[in-house]
C-alpha cells in the first residue's frame, strides 16, 4: 500500500476515519495533538486533529514540531492539511476551496525549525506546497464540482485574535488572497522533513469585511464554525477523492528538499 498518507484536520475536522486506532506516538518535540491510524480508500492513513480532538489548543500553541515529527514516525511521506481561511479578495468567496501555492509568514515566537544545531541547514522554501498533490487535488475538486481556486497565497498571522482593518487592508494590498493562523510553521516543518504537503483552505468569511460593502460583517468565530459545519461533507469527499487519486509513489521533487541544504564543515 506504499507509505502512509497523513491528514491534519483543522478547525471543524476532528475525526475522519470510520475505524481508527488512537496511538501514542513518542516525539522528540513534545506531545502531538493526537494521532489516529486507519485506512481510507484502501490506503494507510494517519490523522491528527491539529487543535486536539476537542479543540483545546490555540493556533500559537499547537505542537507543530511534535505533529510533523509524529507523522514521520508512522511512515508518512505525504500530508493533506485542511485550514479554515478568511478571504482577502472578493473573488475568493465563502464556501470556496483554495489550494495554497505560497505562504507568507506573519507569525512570531513559534518554534519553526527542526534544524537548531549542526549541521547548519537552510531548506529551500520557494515552492513549499507539493505540485503533484496540488494537481491531484485540483482534478478531484473539478470532478466533484466544488468551487475552488488552483492558486492562492495564505498569510499566516499569530492569532488567536483576528486582524484589525488596517492589518487586513495591508495584507490585501500585498496581493495575498487568504489569511489563516496555522499554516505556518506546519508546512515549513514538513518540508524540512522532505515530506509532500498539500494545504487546502476552505473560505469561511471575508476577514474584516469587504471595503465598500457595509453588509459584509467582520469575521466571528460563530460564523467560521457555521460555514465550516455546513460544508464538512464536501471537505471529507474532497480528501477521500484525493487519497483515491494519489499515485502510489511520488514523482515530485519534494523528497529532495534537503539535497545540498546542509553546510558541510
Ligand atoms: Zn511532493
Image: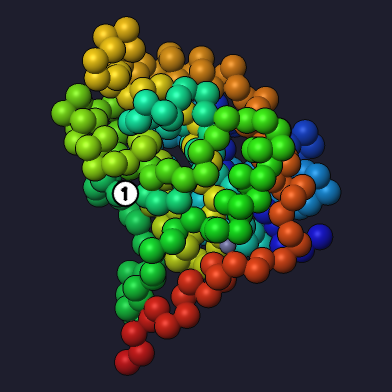
Q: Is residue 260 above or below residue 106?
A: below
Q: Is residue 32 visible?
A: no
Whole-percent x, y for residue 68 in the image:
51, 55
- Along the line of sight, the residue nearer the viewer: 118 or 192: 192
Whole-percent x, y for residue 216 in the image:
33, 12
- What residue appears at the point 73 percent right and 41 percent down from the top-left corner? 241
- What residue appears at the point 47 percent right and 45 percent down from the top-left corner? 151
Q: How many marks?
A: 1
- What residue appears at the point 42 percent right and 83 percent down from the top-left corner? 260
Quarter holding the C terminus? Answer: bottom left
| Within-10-Å neighbours for mark 1: few <14, some 14–19, many 20+ | some
Q: Is residue 171 visible?
A: yes
Quarter holding the N terminus? Answer: bottom right
Residue at the bottom extreme, as displayed = 265
Quadrant of ligand 1: it is bottom right
- What residue appears at the point 77 percent right and 33 percent down from the top-left corner? 18
The residue carrying mark 1 is: 104
Whole-percent x, y for residue 238 in the image:
67, 36
Apparent side of residue 166 relative to residue 41 in the rendered image (left or right): left
What is the quadrant of residue 240 in the picture?
top right
Q: Is residue 135 above or below residue 206?
A: below
Q: Is residue 116 above or below residue 212?
A: below
Amino acid at each position: 500500500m506504499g507509505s502512509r498518507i497523513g491528514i491534519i484536520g483543522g478547525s471543524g475536522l476532528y475525526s475522519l476515519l470510520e475505524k481508527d486506532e488512537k496511538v501514542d506516538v513518542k516525539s522528540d518535540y513534545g506531545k502531538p495533538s493526537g494521532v489516529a491510524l486507519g485506512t481510507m480508500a484502501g490506503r494507510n492513513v494517519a490523522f491528527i486533529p491539529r487543535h486536539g480532538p476537542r479543540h483545546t489548543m490555540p493556533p500559537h500553541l499547537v505542537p507543530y514540531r511534535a505533529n510533523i515529527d509524529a507523522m514521520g514516525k508512522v511512515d508518512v511521506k505525504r500530508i493533506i492539511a485542511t485550514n479554515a481561511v478568511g478571504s482577502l479578495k472578493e473573488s475568493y468567496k465563502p464556501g470556496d476551496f483554495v489550494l495554497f501555492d505560497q505562504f507568507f509568514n506573519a507569525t512570531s515566537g513559534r518554534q519553526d525549525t527542526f534544524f537548531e544545531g549542526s549541521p547548519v541547514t537552510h531548506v529551500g522554501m520557494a515552492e513549499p506546497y507539493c505540485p503533484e498533490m496540488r494537481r491531484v487535488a485540483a482534478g478531484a475538486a473539478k470532478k466533484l464540482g466544488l468551487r475552488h481556486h488552483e492558486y492562492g497565497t495564505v498569510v499566516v498571522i499569530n492569532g488567536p485574535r483576528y486582524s484589525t482593518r488596517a492589518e487586513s487592508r495591508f495584507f490585501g494590498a500585498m496581493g495575498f488572497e487568504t489569511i489563516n493562523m496555522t499554516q505556518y510553521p506546519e508546512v515549513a516543518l514538513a518540508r524540512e522533513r522532505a515530506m509532500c504537503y498539500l494545504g487546502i483552505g476552505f473560505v469561511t468569511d471575508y476577514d474584516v469585511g469587504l471595503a465598500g460593502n457595509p453588509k459584509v460583517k467582520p469575521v466571528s468565530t460563530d460564523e467560521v464554525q457555521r460555514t465550516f459545519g455546513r460544508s464538512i461533507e464536501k471537505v471529507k469527499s474532497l480528501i477521500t477523492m484525493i487519497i483515491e487519486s494519489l499515485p502510489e509513489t511520488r514523482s515530485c521533487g519534494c523528497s529532495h528538499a534537503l539535497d545540498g541544504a546542509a553546510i558541510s564543515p
